[in-house]
Image: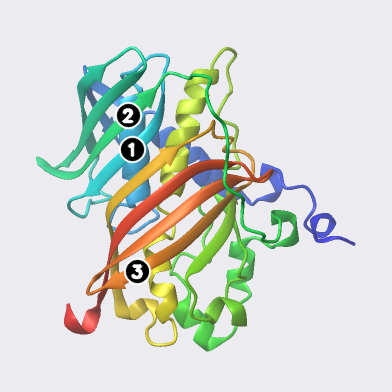
């Protein structure tokens, strides 16, 4: 019997109620409350502790910008994480309409808590055009139906050394289903390495109403922004696993850039090919590509993160 047959259907009903609830909650969080023109309010995920997950703020900021445009989609987003946000306070998103051109539209978004900016975003939107088309090759890795869900694998880890390197949230369901090419806790996963490819997909449909394709694509791209911050900073630490564990490090996103090259099918498997190029002092660089299962390059990501050893913090 194949692994796919053993796992059964991969629909929401078999992904676990917790993941379905987290996914539905994230969709709800993207329905920002409009306070006045160009000003929106967002609520937060309570499951990530006292600090806000940067991907949530990025996704909501992208959605706030999207709410102020017509007929165009985000293709380039550049963000800075300025202060740690608090999960017990709503976030205000103030949108500046920088430019409305014939082909390109520019927005600037500032996320605010307690009267202070915690995050800012510059986003460019593009009217769809016909042009040149090519894509670099996707890495040769196992397909998602050959791998097990990360949460199931993490919960089965018994090796004490492997547990020390697991993320605190590895055993909890997140809004996305993920399947790591290096199975969590395995000998290959524990090796020092520079890359961390993971398959992911969002388990709920984002188009529930007719003639809503443009809005659905805006939501899909905001969800991709959320996913683009998952595990990026921790990838910087992977070449040093034999010297340090996650508990010894303070990690945070500093700045983040994502370019979206093609329409995002967020309900289908995407290969999130994360890798690190360098680390020095307390900062490190992460890079990633999102590939469709058929091998097309969907989006590219670059992030600088804080990776500080607690001994010298």
Left or right relative to 34: residue 289: right
Residue 276 in the image: above or below residue 55: below
Q: Residues within 10 Å of mark 2 (few under 14, many from 20)?
A: many
Residue 262 placed where, x, y %?
53, 33
Q: Secondary structure at mark 2?
A: strand
Residue 186 in view of the camera: no
- Nearer to us: label 1 or label 3: 3
Residue 267 in the image: above or below residue 136: above
Q: Quadrant of residue 133?
A: top right
Q: Are marks 1 and 2 in contact (CB under 8 Å)?
A: yes
Residue 162 in the image: above or below residue 68: below
Q: Are marks 3 and 2 in contact (CB under 8 Å)?
A: no
Q: Residue furthest right?
A: 1
Q: Earlier in the sequence, mark 1 or mark 2?
A: 1
Check disc 2 and report the residue beneath it. 124
Residue ID at (48%, 59%): 274
Which disc number belongs to residue 285?
Answer: none
Measured Cα–Cα span from mark 1 to mark 3? 22 Å
Q: How many marks?
A: 3
Q: Earlier in the sequence, mark 3 or mark 2?
A: 2
Residue 291 placed where, x, y %?
58, 46
Q: Secondary structure at mark 1?
A: strand
Q: Residues within 10 Å of mark 1 (few under 14, many from 20)?
A: many
Residue 114 placed where, x, y %?
12, 43
Q: Secondary structure at mark 3?
A: strand
Check disc 3 and report the residue beneath it. 278
Check disc 1 and report the residue beneath it. 77
Residue 165 in view of the camera: yes
């Amino acid at each position: 019997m194949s692994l796919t047959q053993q796992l059964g259907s991969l629909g929401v009903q078999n992904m676990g109620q917790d993941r379905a609830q987290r996914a539905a909650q994230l969709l709800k969080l993207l329905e920002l409350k409009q306070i006045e023109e160009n000003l929106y309010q967002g609520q937060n995920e309570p499951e990530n502790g006292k600090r806000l997950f940067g991907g949530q703020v990025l996704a909501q900021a992208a959605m706030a910008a999207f709410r102020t445009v017509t007929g165009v989609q985000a293709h380039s987003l550049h963000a800075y994480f300025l202060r740690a946000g608090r999960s017990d306070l709503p976030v205000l998103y103030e949108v500046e309409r920088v430019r409305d051109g014939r082909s390109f539209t520019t927005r600037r978004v500032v996320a605010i808590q307690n009267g202070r900016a915690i995050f800012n975003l510059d986003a460019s939107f593009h009217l769809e055009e016909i042009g040149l088309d090519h894509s670099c090759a996707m890495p040769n890795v196992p397909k998602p139906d050959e791998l097990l869900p990360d949460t199931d694998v993490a919960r089965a880890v018994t090796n004490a050394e492997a547990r020390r390197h697991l993320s605190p949230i590895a055993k909890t369901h997140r809004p996305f289903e993920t399947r790591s090419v290096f199975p969590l806790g395995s000998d290959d996963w524990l090796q020092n390495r520079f890359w961390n490819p993971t398959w992911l997909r969002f388990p709920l449909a984002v188009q529930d109403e007719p003639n809503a394709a443009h809005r659905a694509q805006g939501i899909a791209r905001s969800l991709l922004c959320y996913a683009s911050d998952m595990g990026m900073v921790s990838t910087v630490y992977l070449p040093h696993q034999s010297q340090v564990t996650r508990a010894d490090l303070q990690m945070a996103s500093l700045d983040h850039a994502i370019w979206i090259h093609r329409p995002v099918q967020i309900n289908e498997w995407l290969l999130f090919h994360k890798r690190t190029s360098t680390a020095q002092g307390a900062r490190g660089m992460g890079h990633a590509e999102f590939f469709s299962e058929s091998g097309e390059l969907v989006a590219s990501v670059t992030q600088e993160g804080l990776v500080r050893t607690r001994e010298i913090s």
